[in-house]
Amino acid sequence: MKRTTRFVSLLGAAAAVTGAALAVGPGASADPAAHPHPVALASAAVSQKPTVVLVHGAWADASGWTPVAEKLQKDGYTVKAPPNPLRGLTSDAQYIAAYLKQIQGPIILVGHSYGGAVITDAAVGNPNVKALVYIAAFAPAEGDSLAGLNSKPVAHPIPPVPAQPSTYPKPDGGTGTELTIDPAKYGDVFLDNELPASEAQALAAEQRPLSLDSVNERSGTPAWASVPSWYMVAKQDHAIAPDLERFMAARAHAHTVEVNGPHLIMFTNPRPVTALIERTATATAR
């Protein structure tokens, strides 16, 4: 909506409220709450929009959501993009669940890639989460692991993700294994080579590794069994097979769209991703 149109709408609201106030006869309540100011009415309308929480996946960080976050904020949404620890599915879901509990009002919870598995567990039991949105993401059922899902036969399989293992110290004193995408192949796997090589190389350098625990741990009761869900299949995905995405979306009874784009589709194609999130917010508004 253009700024002029919005201003005219506010003037119309002001005139309507003023007329109603003048029409009230003697003895009517003078309580401001009974006749709220038009600006207050406009603010209340804005505050009814849900908070959109964007959860990133493996081999990325929250900055991958920047193009989508900018568009959502421009359209009046409160946006939060917390860091996903990437240390283990159970602990990551607990972290995001605790984060969600500190948000007041309705939430649209969005997950990309591994972030989809995290939101599937994190949203369970939170009545403020009105919808789940999966963007080229894992949507596990109870008992699923990412390793198990990736090994599921599909009609059009993709090559294994070229992940390089390394070690890291665990808090309990043990040694864990974490995985990083081969930087030389990052542009193909995540971006289908849609960005200039220099940008792909920068994203490869900035990627955050995924603990092997996150790949092997099994998911709990899925939130999509009780919360409405939407799903975007990235048709040129080289990290999660598009056929696997379709399977998970159908199993979750998600409202599904398919878009031409790579795995990091919210970075390369932010417009349809934003549109799906906003359509979800509208569909679940109360």
Image (cartoon, rainbow, N blue to C red):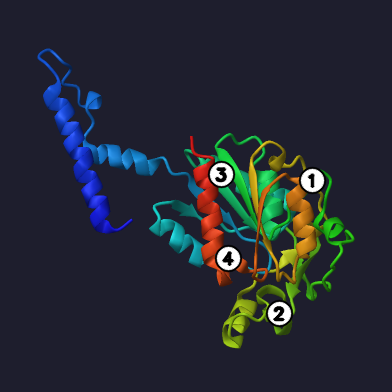
Residue underneath mark 2: 188
- Labelled pair 4, 1 in contact (Cβ < 8 Å): no
Q: Amino acid at mark 4?
A: Met
Question: The residue tagged with tag 1: helix, strand or loop?
Answer: loop
- Labelled pair 3, 4 in contact (Cβ < 8 Å): no
Residue 173, visible in the rendered structure = no
Q: CA distance from mark 4 to mark 1?
A: 24 Å
Q: Is residue 98 above or below residue 197?
A: above
Closer to the N terminus: mark 3 or mark 1? 3
- Front label number (3 vs 2): 2
Q: Is residue 267 above or below residue 7?
A: below
Residue underneath mark 4: 266
Closer to the N terminus: mark 1 or mark 2? 1
Residue underneath mark 1: 141
Q: How many numbered circles does the render carry?
A: 4
Q: Amino acid at mark 3?
A: Leu
Mark 2 Cα-neighbour bin, 10 Å: few <14, some 14–19, many ≥20: some
Q: Is residue 140 left or right of residue 5?
A: right
Closer to the N terminus: mark 3 or mark 4? 3
